[in-house]
Amino acid sequence: MGRKWWERDACVRLTARRLGYARTGSRIRDAFKSAINGAIRRGLLEYDGTQIRRTAKSP
């Protein structure tokens, strides 16, 4: 992911493809939304509106 800003929807879609899913349905979107929100709460990701990126302190 790097420190580049990504649109949340694009990030979910590209990650799902990378994991081998052909489509991104509601269950996959919901799971990724939860994971992204958890990473934001833990300080691994930061957000600005609809964009997300890794924080500087992320491994």
Image (cartoon, helix red, strand yellow):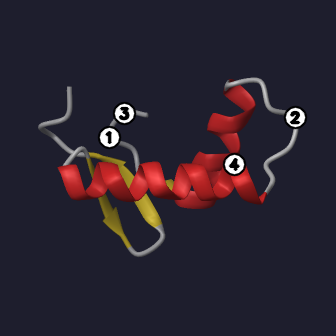
Give the alpha-carbon distance from disc 4 to disc 3, as whole Å. Answer: 22 Å
- Which of pointers 4 and 3 lies earlier in the amino acid sequence? 3
Assess whether mark 1 and mark 2 are in contact (beta carbons under 8 angstroms): no
Give the alpha-carbon distance from disc 3 to disc 1, as whole Å. Answer: 4 Å
| Residue 3 vertical placement versus 52 (above, below) | above
Identify the amino acid type marked 1: Arg
Q: x%, y% of residue 46?
A: 27, 57
- Which of pointers 2 and 4 lies earlier in the amino acid sequence? 2
Q: Which residue is mark 3?
A: 2
Question: Within 10 angstroms of label 3, few (less than 14), some, or many (20 or more) residues?
Answer: few
- Picture residue at 33% right of the left edge, 53% below the top: 38
Identify the amino acid type marked 4: Ile
Instruction: Single out the mark in the foreground, 2 or 3.
Output: 2
Question: Within 10 angstroms of label 4, few (less than 14), some, or many (20 or more) residues?
Answer: some
- Picture residue at 80% right of the left edge, 32% below the top: 21
- Picture residue at 62% right of the left edge, 58% below the top: 30
Identify the amino acid type marked 3: Gly
Q: Which residue is mark 4?
A: 28
Identify the amino acid type marked 2: Ala
Q: What secondary structure is marked by label 4? A: helix
Q: Which residue is mark 1?
A: 3
Q: x%, y% of residue 15?
A: 62, 36
Q: Which residue is mark 2?
A: 22
- Which of pointers 4 and 1 lies earlier in the amino acid sequence? 1
